[in-house]
Image (cartoon, rainbow, N blue to C red):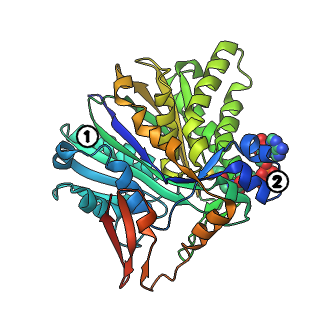
């Protein structure tokens, strides 16, 4: 049975910060951010959005009335969840009106959560071929004003429907994992900003990629030339370029090198415009690659997922005949209609998230054009509503 990705969608804030402006404000050369980090814009998430509303806004685009009845499993990948107990999947089920027979859980392992969901969905659909699984990767990436990680912030959500006989990608059954207890990035329970050893994390990312990629090739007996594209979790887009270079630098086949680099450029386009999505990042890169429409049926894509702490996985997927019809330009057109904010405005919005956890509050949701918003908190309960 063919199992894989049937539909995908993406949502982020209507506000962004130009990286050039951030570089100037931090007394850095803009090319360090634009080329050295590989980011052009950074999504600025309003205080009326959180991982639940971002996920609901992304999923709304692909969960129609038919899906609401058919979805039987909701897997919510996040590392910026809103509750230590209740899963974001329950809020999502309620906000979208998905049938109450569907089950749902939240999955956490840093940026790896959505990939864990993909593998669970593979097994679930193999047992229940009629199943349609809704998966989301939804996060707000916060490092702190003036920190080294600030230029790699961002946020947003990717939503995916997986099923048998998918329209976009057929996912392979082989994959290679690597798990090691390391402290490259973590976020203690009292913090909304991550703690990170950025250089160490970037080095481990490459080590994890090389090891899982080699293990995958060994397991399958395949060579690198089997792949039309290699794509990556992109905490910043230069990270993926460095990982790709680490396996193509010694290749004799110049055409293959050039083609992998060309497809990598296509795969980082959307990530460049938004910044880090944590769990959704690899899948935004996948969406970006599909939107370039430069692939043909049967092309094999290699995907590397990395979640600090750390777990890495390399797996592959094959492009399905006619996939182009299921990736529309309208889906990402909203990115060109976003509003640019100044560094001072970004800092004000950033600080507005620092509200006492136990107090009642109200967000500035009236200014937010998103369909689902967080209106505030009363008696330590978050108030969500579909307002647009
Ligand atoms: N023009 C072009 N490139 C320039 C430049 C310029 N004027 N000035 C510097 N650069 C390049 C550097 O050479 C470097 O390239 P390289 O990585 O290929 O060597 C790159 O820009 C970044 O410079 P660096 O000095 O390493 O940046 P930094 O120390 O300020 O911060 C991180 C980089 C990644 C450590 C930091 O953003 C971070 O901690 N991010 C969060 C953690 C993260 O993303 N982890 C990844 C794994 S999940």
Disc 2 crowd rating (10 Å Cα; few below 14, some 14-19, many 20+) is few
Across and down, in percent, residue 130 comes to: 18, 38
Report which quarter residue 217 is drawn in: top right
Disc 1 crowd rating (10 Å Cα; few below 14, some 14-19, many 20+) is many
Q: Which residue is mark 2?
A: 28
**Location of residue 193 with respect to 198 vertically, above or below:** below
Across and down, in percent, residue 320 comes to: 36, 23
Q: Which residue is mark 1?
A: 125
Q: Is residue 139 left or right of residue 151?
A: left
Q: Is residue 192 left or right of residue 28?
A: left
The tag on residue 59 is none
Task: Answer whether labels 1 and 2 touch (C-beta < 8 Å).
Answer: no
Q: Secondary structure at mark 2?
A: loop
Q: Secondary structure at mark 1?
A: helix
Q: Is residue 7 left or right of residue 267?
A: left
Report which quarter residue 94 is drawn in: bottom left
Q: Nearer the viewer, residue 338 or 254?
A: 338
**Location of residue 151 with respect to 219 vertically, above or below:** below
Mark 2 C-beta to ligand 1 under 8 Å: yes
Residue 341 visible to an observer of this rendering? yes
């Amino acid at each position: 049975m063919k199992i894989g990705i049937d539909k995908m969608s993406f949502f982020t804030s209507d506000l962004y910060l130009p990286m050039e402006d951030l570089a100037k404000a931090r007394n850095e050369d803009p090319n360090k951010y634009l080329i050295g980090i590989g980011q052009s814009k950074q999504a600025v998430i309003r205080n009326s959005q959180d991982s639940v509303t971002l996920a609901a806004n992304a999923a709304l685009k692909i969960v129609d009335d038919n899906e609401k009845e058919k979805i039987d499993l909701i897997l919510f990948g996040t590392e910026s969840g809103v509750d230590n107990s209740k899963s974001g999947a329950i809020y999502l089920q309620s906000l979208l009106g998905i049938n109450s027979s569907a089950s749902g859980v939240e999955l956490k392992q840093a940026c790896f959560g959505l990939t864990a969901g993909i593998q669970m969905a593979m097994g679930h659909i193999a047992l229940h071929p009629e199943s349609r699984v809704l998966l989301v990767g939804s996060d707000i990436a916060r490092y702190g004003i003036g920190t080294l990680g600030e230029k790699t912030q961002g946020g947003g959500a990717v939503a995916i429907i997986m099923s048998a006989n998918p329209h976009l990608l057929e996912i392979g059954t082989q994959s290679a994992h690597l798990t090691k207890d390391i402290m490259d990035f973590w976020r203690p329970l009292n913090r909304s900003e991550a703690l990170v050893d950025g250089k160490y994390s970037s080095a481990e990312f490459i080590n994890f990629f090389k090891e899982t990629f080699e293990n995958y090739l060994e397991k399958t007996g395949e060579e690198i030339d089997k792949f039309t594209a290699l794509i990556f979790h992109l905490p910043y887009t230069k990270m993926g370029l460095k990982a790709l270079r680490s396996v193509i630098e010694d290749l004799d086949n110049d055409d293959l090198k050039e083609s992998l680099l060309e497809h990598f450029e296509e795969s980082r386009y959307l990530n460049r415009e938004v910044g880090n999505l944590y769990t959704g990042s690899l899948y935004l890169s996948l969406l970006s690659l599909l939107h370039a429409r430069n692939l043909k049926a049967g092309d094999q894509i290699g995907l590397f997922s990395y979640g600090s702490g750390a777990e890495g996985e390399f797996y592959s997927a094959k492009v399905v005949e006619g996939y182009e019809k299921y990736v529309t330009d309208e889906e990402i057109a909203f990115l060109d209609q976003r509003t640019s904010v100044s560094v001072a405005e970004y800092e004000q919005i950033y600080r507005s998230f620092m509200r006492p956890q136990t107090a009642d509050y109200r967000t500035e949701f009236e200014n937010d054009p998103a369909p689902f918003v967080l209106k505030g908190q009363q008696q330590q309960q978050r108030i969500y509503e579909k307002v647009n």
